[in-house]
Every structure is written in structure tokens, then in C-alpha cells.
Image: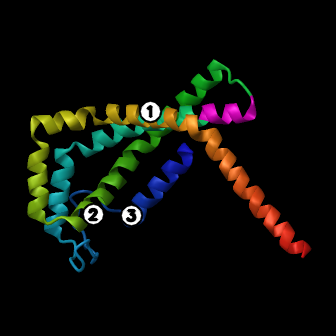
Amino acid sequence: MIKIFFLLSLALATANSAGLAHGQEIAVPPITGQAGTEEITEAALAASYRLLDSTNYTEQVKANVYPMALTFFNEGLSQTAKKAGIELDEALIKNLRSAMIEELGLVMEEYTKKTRIEAAFIYAKYYEPQELNRLAEIYTDPVMQKSIEIGPKIQVELVSLGMETMREYQPQIEQRMKDVVEQYLAQIIAEERS
């Protein structure tokens, strides 16, 4: 699951940003924004980068990805072992976690660079330069800085809570899916017999 998450994220991040780096001259393609017909301007893109810098974007991505990846990894590992009816050795789990962290470290610099470029385009698509500048000001407020700093910790706790809660409903959901498949197959068989 983690591998799929990162492959999708990397694929999305590289779709329009191959070869771009912050500070380079960029030919900005016309992109329709939420309002309808606006194009991304160089001023909006520059303001987007200022906004991302005000939120410590690169550090925030790193602060979010590691704990979230490990949360999903732990859950996926637990569910896989449970479904297989096996108990994994703690040494193996430790080695798998270490390998996961090592792999994340190898891709993190490139990942944050590419997603930063895409994030700048996304913000520039929906906001005017002056709005982005105002957001950057807001993000320098000490309460916002605290929110940015502790956000990853809160997010991990909320995701863990959500996973715990969903575990309670998982048997019910799995049974419902099984019932739907069985009903569908029974209907196909009945149609083939008639």
C-alpha cells in the first residue's frame, strides 16, 4: 500500500514538472483555474513559492511523510499478517521498518523537490498573487507556525485513530462486500441457466 501511495504521488508530481527547479525561467502553460479562464502567471507562481517557503514546505513534507508512511506500513503489515494467519517475528518487523525508512530517505529529496514545484502550480492556479502574499503573511503568525509545526503529529494521531475505529467496522464491511460478490455471481449463474 505504501509503495502504491508513493508511486502515485511521484507519478503525479512528475507529470508536469520534469526538469523544472525553483528559480529557473519557466514557460508557464495556460491552465484553467477554478474561476474559469485565468492563466497561471509568473507573478502567481513566484507568490506560490513564497507561500510554500513561509510554511517550510520541504520540511513539512518530510515531517508528514515519514510518520504517515510508517503508520500505513504498520497497519498494512498487521493486516497482511492477520489475514495470512501468521505472527511476524519482531526482528523481521524491525528490519522491514528500517528498510522502509532507508528507502524513504533515498527518494525524499527528489520527492520534495518535485512536489514543491507541483504545489506551486496548484496554488498559482487557484489564487491571485496578492492573495498568496497575504497567505504567506498569515503563515508567519506564531500560532500558524505552531500549527504547522505540530500538524504532522496531530495528523498521525488522527490517522491512527481513524484506522483503529475502522478496524471495528472492517468485518462488517468485508462481509457486505462478500455478500455483494456472492449475489452478483449467483445472478450471473441464474441468467446463464435460463
Which residue occupies the extreme top position in the image? 90
Q: Secondary structure at mark 1?
A: helix
- In the displayed structure, would residue 83 be above or below residue 13? above
Q: CA distance from mark 2 to mark 3?
A: 13 Å
- Pointers 3 and 1 in contact (C-beta within 8 Å): no
Disc 2 is placed on an element classified as helix
**Quadrant where the N terminus is found in the figure:** top right
Which residue is outermost to the bottom?
37
Residue for badge 2: 121
Between 43 and 166, the one nearer to me in the picture: 166
Between residues 105 and 57, which one lies in front from this camera angle? Answer: 57
Residue 175's x, y, as percent? 69, 46
Near-viewer residue (46 or 128): 128
* Residue 109 x/y as whole percent: 37, 44
Q: Earlier in the sequence, mark 3 or mark 1?
A: 3
Mark 3–mark 1 distance (CA, rounded to whole Å): 37 Å
